[in-house]
Image: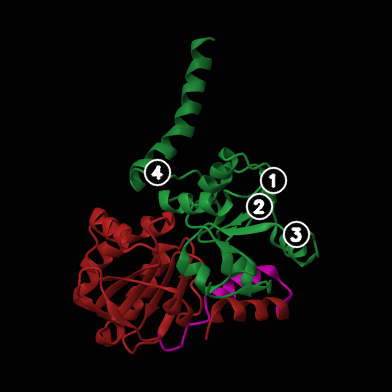
Amino acid sequence: MNSRRMLRVALMAALVVTPVAIARAQWGSGAQTESADSIPQANLVQPEALNQMLRTERAHPPVVLQVGSRAMFDQAHIRDAIYAGPGSQPGGRELLRSRVDRLPRTAEIVIYCGCCPWQRCPNLGPAFAELEQMGFKNVKVLYLANNFGTDWVAKGYPVRQGD
Amino acid sequence: MPLRRAMTAGVLALACGAAGVAQTAATKTLVNARAPEFARAGLDGRRVDLKAYRGKVVLLDFWATWCAPCQAEMPRFAAWQAQYAAQGLQVIGISMDDDAGAAKSVITKLGLNYPVAMGDAKLGERYGGVLGLPLTLLIDRAGVVRAEFEGEADLTAMETQMKALLRQR
């Protein structure tokens, strides 16, 4: 590898690593900050597509998990969704693991958050990574560009309040 | 009324037939309405009562420790609190975290100089449904919401609007 190419590789590595390192330092130990942008496109599901999925009668409907804050979940959540804790927090990931531990690894799971604009959501990346690490093969992530209020509730998709 | 902001936005979006309308409408439903009253214990032990700040311009910030855009804004809010306090500004933070301990750590880390209380679903619903963060409201001296900023806000625009409210006596 010539020196110019090595420099380019080092620069690229710094560009990738530095924001993660800064975020980790900012949030302290235990917090994980993988961006939602780290989730492969193939695993994303759009709101309309999820709504259709949930309206369709199926023997095994997807398990829908909210991986954001409890205060937001209690205000409004996707019908039949289960609260699974903020994915960016160790306690949240522990709750997530307990929610899915008994499911077959082929189960269809949909996670969502919608706390913040997509590229700034701290919860989805770590939650997705956790499920992958547990061996789940069929995990989808609801793509909410702005937030849950704007991209789900305001569109008139069904919601529930409380537990 | 629960979910007022989002529901109103949905109705408007359907009426206008444009997806883009939803976000705009979602940020404005409390504007020109009286700010819902609340009083709760602050994280420093002192009571945070919105009514007590009548006569001041209130910047009410809903945030959470895991919300990166929130944390980018908060040092600016602390700076504004110091800069504009004499003109009648009062910043109030509402943490939408599940855990008060995490919120306290961030308050200490960022050196926040304004009162912060814990929020919950009930308070969120009273404010039209806090279903995305950050959410910042500017409330005038009479207790009426004059501006809402949802998501990553233009802080220069926010400061301009805040200064205009501070000039009103």
The chain carrying label 3 is A
Question: Sequence order check: which comes first, mark 1 or mark 2?
Answer: 2
Question: Sequence order check: which comes first, mark 2 or mark 4?
Answer: 4
Q: Is residue B86 above or below residue A62?
A: below
Q: Is residue B167 above or below residue A71?
A: below
Where residue B160 appears, x then y in whole percent? 37, 70
Q: CA distance from mark 2 to mark 4?
A: 28 Å
Question: Sequence order check: which comes first, mark 3 or mark 1?
Answer: 3
SS category of the residue bearing label 2 = strand
**Residue, disc 2:** A109
Q: Nearer the viewer, mark 1 or mark 4?
A: 1
Point out which mark residue A23 bears. 4
**Callout 1 touching callout 2 (CB < 8 Å):** yes
**Residue, disc 3:** A49
Q: What's under tag 2, amino acid-wise? A: Ile
**Residue, disc 1:** A138
Q: CA distance from mark 3 to mark 4?
A: 32 Å
